[in-house]
Image (spheres, rainbow, N blue to C red):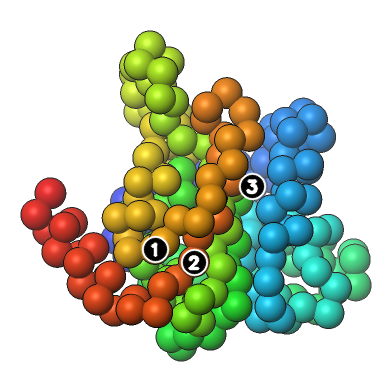
Amino acid sequence: MQIANNNTRAIRNRYNRIAPFYDFMEDLVEKTLYRKWRKLLWSKVEGNKILEIGVGTGNNIPYYPVNAEITAIDFSERMLGHAIEKAKKQGLIIDLQPMDVQNLTFEDDTFDTAVATFVFCSVPDPKKGLREIARVCKPGGRILLLEHVLSANRIVASFMNLVNPMVVRTMGVNINRRTVENVTESGIKIENVTELAAGIFKLIEASKTGSYSENVKTSINSDNRS
Ligand SMILES: C[S@@+](CC[C@H](N)C(=O)[O-])C[C@H]1O[C@@H](n2cnc3c(N)ncnc32)[C@H](O)[C@@H]1O
């Protein structure tokens, strides 16, 4: 697996460290909120060739469409190990691979839909990862993201910005990402954003537009200017 840089390596190591406790730590939110949001997201998946980015311990596996050809990646081998176990227990054949979303090894225009749930809060260079997802999606392909983002409420946002460095150090998660804006700035067309909770949790439905290479050039140029 090609790892982009030391920062990426550090975040990957944090996920390797928390992998044994991850499902336990998430149990309450998983049961009360995430399960229904996962179900909603997977109801919007289209096509047969599906890519899941940042599969983690495999909490989306129960929602994979029957008969779809699923490829799932994660840069944390230990998180991936749990996903492999879950897939085996359910008797599912899934192509699970260690891979960094910032350096996907898939050919251009491969997948009908790409899914990521609670991943772009951690990817060190989120726009690079999003551009890679768009590259490997077919033209018109769907990109579905379940994410928590920085609150639009100024007081809440100030608190999130204040505690973010501590959360990144312990968990590898940023709680102040602007993922909706990052998607647009990566040359990906947003079709719908569903507000799920507290102005923080969102389901982002997007698609790869036909003129992707032009969009990417514009996106990279705007990154260089900022
Ligand atoms: C908060 S967990 C979410 C796991 C799973 N998607 C879920 O919904 O339960 C974030 C996952 O994204 C993975 N991840 C973060 N950055 C990544 C990257 N650059 N490339 C691949 N996986 C990444 C982490 O290893 C971790 O498994």
Residue at the location (83% across, 58% down)? 62
Mark pair 3, 1: CA separation: 31 Å
Residue type, label 2: Ser
In the figure, is residue 73 to the left or right of 213? right
Question: What residue did someone put label 1 on?
Answer: 188
Q: Position of residue 183 (x, y in %)?
A: 39, 54
Nearer-N-terminus badge (3/2):
3
Between residue 100 and residue 138, name the one nearer to us.
Answer: 138
Q: Residue at x 68, y 78 (%)?
A: 47
- Under circle 1, the secondary element is loop
Indicate which label's residue lies in the foreground, 3 or 1.
1
CB of residue at label 1: within 8 Å of ligand 1?
no
Label 1 is placed on what type of residue?
Ile
Question: Gap in Å between the C-alphas at discs 3 and 2?
Answer: 31 Å
Q: Are marks 3 and 1 in contact (CB under 8 Å)?
A: no
Write down the residue under mark 2. Answer: 207
Label 3 CB sits under 8 Å from any ligand 1 atom: yes
Q: Residue pushed farthest front?
A: 191
Secondary element type, mark 2: strand
* Quarter of the image where one finds residue 65: bottom right
Q: Position of residue 15 (x, y in %)?
A: 54, 48
Q: Do labels 2 and 1 touch, CB within 8 Å?
A: yes
Location of mark 3 (residue): 19
